[in-house]
Amino acid sequence: MSKTRKTEKPKRAKPIKHKNGFILNSLILFTTLSIAVFSIGVFVVRQAEIEEKRIELEELIIETREYEKLNSEYLSILNETDKRAYIERIAGEVLGYAYPNERRFYDSNG
């Protein structure tokens, strides 16, 4: 006896609904937003630090140039064969000495 069977399609399994799916999705969203806000905060702070370091670098470059200028003055003094010019310059500029008939003019505006 052969009966013709009607081929039935297999029934699909119904998706399981999780009761805590909302909680899990909320937790994932909260974590993602927290990481994003933290990353933006770190980025802003780092940019401020970079700007501070850039300003500090410019100040150090200016200070280095001043020291190089002073160093070149010292080198020129050391390389002079006649020390008399150096002594006269220091006596006049630093100590305020002058020759008896010498006139000195000082800028009182600055």
Image (tube, helix red, strand yellow):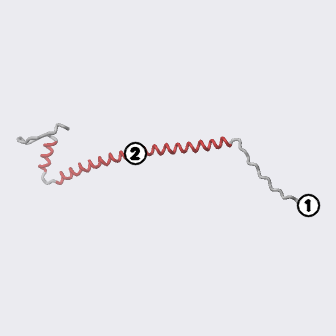
Residue closer to the observer: 67 or 110: 110
* Percent x, y of residue 86: 14, 48
Q: Secondary structure at mark 1?
A: loop
Instruction: Give the mark toward the camera: 2 or 1.
Output: 1
Residue closer to the observer: 83 or 50: 50
Q: Name the residue located 48 percent from the left edge and 44 percent from the top edge.
A: 42
Residue closer to the observer: 98 or 45: 45
Question: Separation of disc 2 and disc 1 at Cα?
Answer: 86 Å
Q: Name the residue located 18 percent from the left edge and 37 percent from the top edge.
A: 109
Q: Secondary structure at mark 2?
A: helix
* Percent x, y of residue 31: 59, 43
Q: Quadrant of residue 3?
A: bottom right
Three-letter amino acid code of the residue under disc 1:
Lys
Residue closer to the observer: 38 or 65: 38
The residue most toward the top is 108
Q: Name the residue located 16 percent from the left edge and 39 percent from the top edge.
A: 107
Left or right: 95, with 2 as reference point: left
Which quarter of the rendering shows the N terminus? Answer: bottom right
Which quarter of the rendering shows the C terminus? Answer: top left
Question: Which residue is under mark 2?
Answer: 51
Marks 2/1 in contact by CB < 8 Å: the verdict is no
Question: Which residue is under mark 1?
Answer: 3
Q: Which label sits on residue 45?
A: none
Q: Name the residue located 88 percent from the left edge and 59 percent from the top edge.
A: 5
Local crowd at mark 1 within 10 Å, few (<14), some, or many (≥20)? few
* Percent x, y of residue 89: 14, 46
Three-letter amino acid code of the residue under disc 2:
Glu
